[in-house]
Image (cartoon, grey):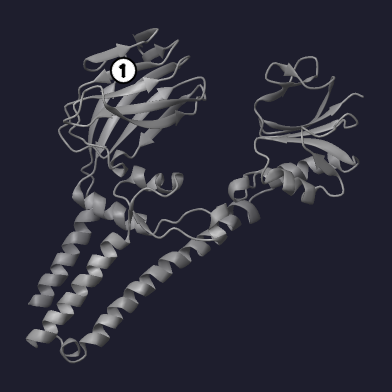
Amino acid sequence: MRRFIILSTILCVFGIIPGAHAMQTEEWSFLGSIPGRWEGVSFTSAVPTKDGLLIKTEKDGRMFRTPQFTFPVDAMRFTLNAPETFQVKFLWNIPGTSPEDMVELPFYVVGTGKEEIVELPLANYREWNAATQRIGLMLPAGTELLLKKMEFLHWNFAEKILYGFRSFWMTDGFRPYTINFLWGPRITANPIANAKMFHSIPPRGWSAFRFLYPLLFLAGAGIFVTYKKNRGPTIVRTQPLFCFLMVCFGLWLLLDIRMGMEYVGYAVKDYETYIAAEPGKRTFRDRNNFNDFVDAALPHIRKRNTYLFMSGQRWPYLGAMRYLTYPSVPLDPGAETDAVDTVVVYERPDITVNGAGELMYLDQKLSTPGTVLLRFGNDSFVFRMNL
C-alpha cells in the first residue's frame, strides 16, 4: 500500500508539471493609447500613436506609474523600437521608503530600427519587490523610443519546479575563464531567467547546493531515525553508515555528470557551429566569424609585408592575426604606418568608406582614396589605398 501511495504521488507530480501552463500575464499596451496614469518628467515629447508611444528626450527623462499587480511578478518584457543603441533603467520603489528612492536596473536597447523585445528576470534580483507602489523608466538625453508594450509575467509553482530542474542542467559557454574554473549548477525558476543565466558574472540564480545540502541532511536524518527505531529496510537498520555514504556517492555522481556535461557541450557546439558548418557561415566560440574573415582576407594580405589592422577590441584578434597571416605582420593603428597601403577592418561599424573612396572614422578622414577589396558582413572589410 505504501509503495502504491509513493508511486501515485510521483506520477501525479510529473503528470501535473508538463501540463502546467498557467502563466499569468498583465499587459500594458501603448498602441493607440496610454495604459493607466503615467507621470512624465523632462520628456521633450511623448506622443501616443497607433504604433506605440513615441518618446523623445533632449535631457535625461523619467516616467512613472503606480501598478496594481494581482500576482507576484517574476519577470517582465518590453516590446519597443529604437533607431540607436542606448541604456535604459527600469525603476521601482521599495515599499516603506521614500517615493523618490528608486532601485535602478539598467538594460540596453540594441536599436536596430526594427521591433525588438527586451526581457528582464526581475525575480533574480533580491531588491525586487512585486508589492512596489511605483515603477518607472529612466531614458538618457537624446533618446528616440517607440514603446509598444510592457508585460509582467508570473509562473505557477509546478512550472517553477520544471524550469528549476531544467536550469540545473544548463551549462555555460566556453569562455576565457573556463581554463581555470567552471560555475557550479544554478537554479532559476522561469524561462527568461534560464535564458539569461550566464549573461552576467557571476551567473544569476541560486546555487544548486542550497537544495542539495538540505537533501543530504534530510537523508542522513532519515537514515539515523530508521536506525534508532529499528524499523524500515534491513540494510538501513544494519548498515546506516554505508547507506549514508551511498547517498553521498549518488549526489557526487549526479554533480560529476552535470559538470562533465560542460565539456561535452563545448565539443557539441564547436562541431555544430564550426566543424560541420559551411565556410563563410562558421562561428567559433567568442570569436564569432573571425576565422572565416581571415580566410577570406588572406589573398589580399599575403603579398604585403605589413598591413594595418583595426578591430573593435585588440585582444584576442591582433595576436591571432600575427599567427594566422604570418609572415605578413599586422600593425596597430598607433604604429608607424606611412608605408602601409592595406587596411584590414574587423567588426568596426564606426569605420567606413565615404563616397570619395576615403577611409573614415566617424567624421574624421583616415586615408587617401582607395578601393575596398573585400567586404565581409556589414562592418568588416579590406581596404587598399591608391599610393
Q: Determine crowd level at label 1: few under 14, some 14-19, many 20+ residues with C-alpha closer than 10 A.
A: some
- Is residue 232 among what the camera can see? no
Q: Callout 1, which amino acid?
A: Met
Whether 240 is drawn above or below 254: the answer is below
Viewer-proximal residue, 70 or 61?
61
Whether 210 is drawn above or below 338: the answer is below
Whether 292 is drawn above or below 107: the answer is below
Image coords of residue 87 (percent x, y): 45, 26
Viewer-proximal residue, 333 or 353?
333
The quadrant of the rendering that contains the C terminus is top right
Viewer-proximal residue, 229 or 109?
229
Residue 94 occupies quadrant: top left
Q: How many tags in the picture?
A: 1
- Residue drawn where x is 52% and y is 63% of the image: 263
Image side of residue 173 versus residue 223, left or right: right
Image side of residue 381 versus residue 111, left or right: right
- Residue drawn where x is 57% and y is 60% of the image: 179
Image coords of residue 214 (percent x, y): 23, 66
- Residue drawn where x is 21% and y is 52% of the image: 158
The quadrant of the rendering that contains the N terminus is bottom left
Residue 187 occupies quadrant: bottom left
Residue corresponding to mark 1: 63
Residue occupying the far bottom of the picture: 238
Viewer-proximal residue, 301 or 363?
363
Image side of residue 141 versus residue 211, left or right: right
Image coords of residue 369 (percent x, y): 84, 19
